[in-house]
Image (tube, rainbow, N blue to C red):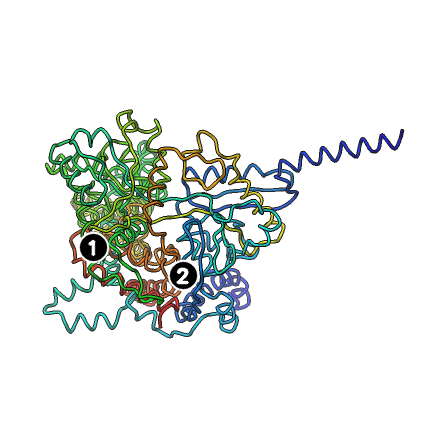
Amino acid sequence: MNMLKTAAVVTAFAVLHGTTAMAGCGLTEGRVNIVGNEFPAIQTVAKGAEACAGDGVEVKANLTADHQKINLAGMQGNPAEYTSAIVANSSIVALINDDVIRPLDDLIAAHGADIPTKQLITIDGKVMAVAFMANAQHLVYRKDILEQIGVEPPKTYEELLAAAAMIREKGIMQNPVGGPFAAGWNLAEEFVNMYLGHGGEFFKEGTAEVSINNPQGVAALNVMKSLTELMNPDYLTHDSNATSAEWEAGNVALMNMWGSRTGVLQDNEGSEPVVYENTMVGAPMTVGGGTIPASTLWWDGWTVAKNVSDADATATFVAMKNGISPSILTDQTMGEAVWMIEGYKPAPVNAGVFSAIEMGTKPYPMLPYMGLLHTALGDNLADFLQGKESAEQALADTEAAYTAAAKEKGFLK
Amino acid sequence: MKHKTFFWFVLPSVLAMLLFIAFPIVSVVLQSLHVSHEQVIVQVENCGPFGCTQSTKIDTQATEALRAAQPLGRWAGLSTYLDRGHLAVAEVAAEWRNAASMGEFLGRLTNLPFYNAMFFTLSYTFIVTPLTLIFGFAIAVAVNSAAKSLRGPLIFFTLLPMIVTPLVGSLILFWMVDARGIFGAALQWAAGDPNLSVKASTPLMWIMLMVYGVWHAAPFAFIVYYAGLQTVNKETLEAAVVDGASRWERIRYVVLPHLLPLTTFIALIQLMDNFRVFEPIVSFSAQAHATSLSWAIYNDLGGETRQLSSAAATSVLTIIGIAILLSPVLVRTWRDFSRK
C-alpha cells in the first residue's frame, strides 16, 4: 500500500514535471537572447521562440532596423550577449568573417533531425544557419490607376517608366513612382538590383577587385535616375518604412518593394479602402532587354552564437526551432512572408517572391567583401542622382572608396 | 596646500581621467596605426534554399592564427590617415596637378569624403557658434528685463530646446519640414513650386541643420549669460544712467566687458560641440547632402563590415581638429591667466 502510494506520488510528480518542462519546449535551463531586423515575419518567429520561456528558460528578443549595427558587437563577448542573430544572406557574412556563430551540425543531429535540408544554409560543408523565409523585391502596383490609364502591369522598368509618365501627364498623381532610395544601405541595394538586371558582375572573377565602372553600371544608374525623376523629391530620405507610408497615403502607384512588406500594404490598417483594395503584387521587372529580373533573392534565417555555453546554445536552438515550427502559421501570419515551413500555403500576396524565384533572380552575393562594396555604393551614388556629378564619376568614386576600405580590411594588397 | 594633500585630493579625478579619457585615446591611436591582417580567402561551396553556388569565404582558422600571433593586426603606420577615406594625399596631389583653377580644385576636393565632411563641419561650426552666442545673449537680456513674476516660466520655456534629446528634437523638425509637413508645405506654397523640398536641396538642408544647431544650443548660452547678468555691478549701471548712457551704451560698455570671460567659456564649449555635429545629420537623414567627421565614424562602424581602423583614424583627426580649433581661445585664456 505504502509502496503504491509512493509510486503514485512519484508518477504525479513526474507528470507535473513533464508538463512544466513542456512550457519550456522540453528545456530546463538556458538563456536565449535574439537580435534581428524588425518586420512582421521576424516578429512572429521571435514570438514563437518566446513561447519556450519559463521554468528556468529565459527568452528575450531585440528586434530593430539597426540590428546589423549591434549584432556583431553583441556576439563578440564571451559569453555573448545575443545567443542568436536573425540574419539574411548579406548580414550572415559579417558574422562568419569574425567567426562569432557556431556550426549547427551537432545540434541538428541531437534536436533538429526533422528540419528539411533545403532550409539549411551550408557553407563549406557546415550548417551555419537555418532559413525560414524567402524574400525578394518585386513590383507593387495600384490596379485602379493602371486601369484608368489603360495599361497592363509593367513587366520591365521601361514599361514602368512609360506608365508612370502617363500617370503624371494625366494629372492623376504628381509623383507616381515609389521605392526605398534612402541614401545608404537602401540606395546601394537598388543599385545592386539594377546592376544584376543589366547582367553586371561586381568583382573580377575569383578576386576582391571591384569592377562596376562599366556600361552596365552606367546604364543601371541612368535607369535609377529616370525613376527618381518620377518620385517624391525627398526620395533620398525614404527607406522602406517611409516608402510604405507614401504608398498607404495613396501618393504612389508603382514601386519595386520587398515581398515581406506587401502584406502590411494590403491590410485595412493605415490606408483608405481605395488604396489597400487596389494594391496588387506583380513579378519583379527586367531592365534593358535583360532576362534576369532586376532584383535579388534573399533568405532570412537564424544562427546560434559561438561564445555561449552548450546549455544556452541548446536552449537557443530549440527555442528558435520552435519559433519556426508549423504551429506559428495562423491565418494572420500566413501571408507575412514566403515561409519555408511545412503547412505553408502561398497567399496571393506572396506571388511576387515566387515569381522572383521562378524567373531565376540571382541571390544577393554572399561574399566576404560585399558588405564593404555595399557601404561604398550607399555613400557615393547620391551625388549622381542629385545631378552633382556624372555616372562614371560616381562609379569611380565608389570603386576608389571600396578599394581603400578593402585594403584596410586586408582583402586587397 | 601641501603637496601630499594636493596629491590625495586630485588622485580620484586623475585616475578617472586616465581610465576614461587617456587610455581610450591611446587605444584609438594604436588602432588607427594598424589594419586588419591579410584575409586568407578560400573557395567554398555554399548551399541554401536557392541552390548551391561556388563562393569565397574567410578561412577563420588561418585568420585566427594570424590574430593570435599579432592581436593588434598589421602595422600600417600612417597609411590609414593618408588613404582616400581620410587625408587622401595622393588624390589631392593629383587634383592639384590636374585642376585648371582654384575653384575647380576646391570643387574636386569636396568629392573626397574627408574634405567634404570638413567643408560642412567647419561651415557649421563657424556659422552656428557666433549665432548661438548672439541669440543666447539677446534672450538673456530680454528675459532679464521681463517682470520678475514672468521670469520663471520664461526661463523654463527657453530651456526646452536643450532639454529635448537632440535625436528627438531634430526628428520633430524633420517631420515639420517634410514636403507634407507644416513648414515644408508652407514653403512650397510661398515659393509657388510644388517640387521644392528642404530634404531634396543641399543648400536648404544645410540651412535647416544650422537652424536646428542654433535652436538647440542657444538655451545653453542663454542660461550662462543670464547667470552672468545677475552679477553685473548695479552701481556701475546706475552711474552709467546718471551719465546719460542709453540702454545700448550700457550693454556695450558695461555689460559686455563684464561678460567677456563667459563668452570665452561658451565659445569654447560650442566650438567643441559644433565640430562634433552628428545627431541632426542622422535624424534629418541628411547624409546625401551633409556629412561630418563624427558621422563618418558612425558610418564606418555601422556597415555590415565594420571598419575599425578607419573609424579610429577619423577619431584621431577629430581630436586634432578640435585642438587646432580651440588653440586661439586656449592661448588667450592662458595669457589672461598669467597676466593676473
Q: Is residue A1 left or right of residue A86?
A: right
Q: Residue furthest right?
A: A1
Q: Quadrant of the C terminus of chain A?
A: bottom left
Mark nearest the camera among 1 and 2 is 2
Q: Residue at x 22, y 44 (%)?
A: A156
Which is nearer the eye, A367 or B327? Answer: A367
Q: Chain of mark 2?
A: B
How packed mark 1 is, by other alpha carbons closer than 10 Å (few <14, some 14-19, many 20 or more), is some
Helix, strand or loop for disc 2 = strand
Q: Residue at x 58, y 46 (%)?
A: A112
How packed mark 2 is, by other alpha carbons closer than 10 Å (few <14, some 14-19, many 20 or more), is some
Question: Mark 2 and mark 1 in contact (Cβ < 8 Å)?
Answer: no
Q: Residue at x 34, y 65 (%)?
A: A405
User: Which residue carries the number 1 mark?
Assistant: A383
Coordinates of residue B179 in the picture (x, y in percent): 21, 38
Label disc, if present, on residue B55 of the rendered structure: 2
Q: Is residue A230 left or right of residue A96?
A: left
Quarter of the view holding residue B35: bottom left
Q: Residue furthest top?
A: A273
Quarter of the view holding residue A265: top left
- In the rendered structure, which amino acid carries the disc numbered 2? Ser
Label total for image: 2
Tell me: residue A217, above or below residue A153: below
Q: Chain of mark 1?
A: A
Coordinates of residue B92 in the picture (x, y in percent): 21, 70
- In the rendered structure, which amino acid carries the disc numbered 1? Asp
Q: Quadrant of the N terminus of chain A?
A: top right
Can residue B231 be seen from the camera position used here? no
Which is nearer the eye, B232 or B218? Answer: B218
Which is nearer the eye, A172 or B128? Answer: A172
Coordinates of residue A171 in the picture (x, y in percent): 12, 32
Q: Is residue B9 left or right of residue A190?
A: right
